[in-house]
Image (spheres, helix red, strand yellow):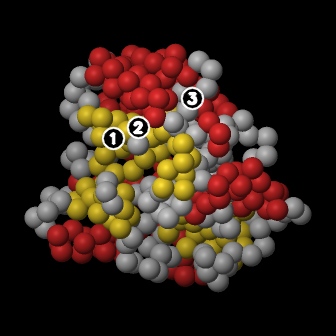
Amino acid sequence: MQRFDPDYVFFEPGALEYPLGKTLYEQFQKQGVPIQMTTSHNQVRGIPGETETEKYRNAKRTLVVGVRKTLKFDTSKPSAEYAIPLTTGCAGHCHYCYLQTTMSSKPYIRIYVNLDEILDQAGAYIMERAPEITRFEAACTGDPVSVEHLTGSLRRYIEYMATKEYGRLRFVTKFANVDTLLGVQHNGHTRIRFSINSRYVIRHFEPATSTFEERIEAAGKIAEAGYPLGFIVAPIMKYEGWEEEYRELLHRLHERLKNVEIQDLTFELIQHRFTKVAKNTIMKRYPKTKLDMNEENRKLKWGRYGRFKYVYPPETVDEMKQLFEETIPGYFPQAEISYFV
Ligand code: SF4
């Protein structure tokens, strides 16, 4: 199963003052992984590589263990009130990944060891808003499950939220190594969403993440463990045979989940879109990509972040919507389709 085991590790000296930092240091030392020190997790120098591409590849194999100093959480509207820090960066190589544009210059993976301080801050936010529910998203800047075998942070966060009447946690993942989360006391306060797609999209555009089969199996285990469950089908793409493959995806999810009682199930549906900036970065990082970014087949739409984005034309969007809106209720009558964008 795909999981992230780094080739290079950097530590901030301050990280060694925390139990998790010490444990990780000893663990990597024992494994013989090259360790270097860095003054700040935001400024890491010395990742090997002759060319830009090599440096990028190696950065995606590099872990930086640091202390999260900024304890002011970013907002994460509309699906959560706050982004809770857990990891920044990701070892996955999804060609279309949002991190390409937001974090292109620092593709290494950062994790934080001051978990108690982060959770205390979350507690303060919960108190401020109580009795309103406060939701925290743990996957705004990376994939938290991909580093869980190293940090155990998700487990800690889930257990913490289970004790908070007004606190909720949510995250999304493309990784299937969820076994350590199965026996955790969650009280239904954490929603685990799987980012899932057709076989074609996963095979061609999501290297270094878990496979189609592995993600379906992981979702089954999470459902059996009683967590609120969700699927993000994104990015939905049109290609030869797409309709058949997306139907297969929903059918396979149904087959895996049909004998599990699931009270709470959501689907989020997102069509593929790109900006000019993202296209340029993707072509530089993955020059052989088969990702269809031909502007002529798309419609230009003004985006929320002040940039034009290319989306599918209305007739394609209608076909996509129809496929999902007809098929999902047939297989999952209790599911809520949160949105299609
Ligand atoms: Fe980006 Fe998610 Fe893929 Fe990681 S798994 S590269 S965060 S899209």
Residue on which disc 1 sits: 339
Residue that label 2 marks: 269
Question: Whole-Å distance between the Cαs marked 3 and 1?
Answer: 19 Å
Spatial separation of the CA atoms under disc 2 and disc 1? 6 Å
**Outermost residue toward the left in this view:** 131
Q: Quadrant of residue 136?
A: bottom left
Of the numbered discs 2 and 1, the one sitting upstream in the chain is 2
x and y percentages locating residue 178 in the rendered image: 45, 41
Amino acid at dot 3: Lys
Res 100 quadrant in image: bottom right
Q: Say if residue 336 shows up in the picture.
A: yes
Q: Is residue 218 left or right of residue 103?
A: left
- Picture layout, residue 165 above or below residue 256: below
9 lies left or right of 178:
right
Q: Which residue is mark 3?
A: 238
Element at label 2 = strand
What x and y, as percent, mark residue 180? 42, 44
Q: Residue at x 72, y 73 (%)?
A: 36
Which quadrant of the figure contains the N terminus? Answer: top right
Residue shown at 59% from the left, 18% from the top: 241
Q: How packed is label 2: few (under 14 Cα within 10 Å), some, or many (20 or more)? A: many
Q: Under tag 1, what secondary structure?
A: strand
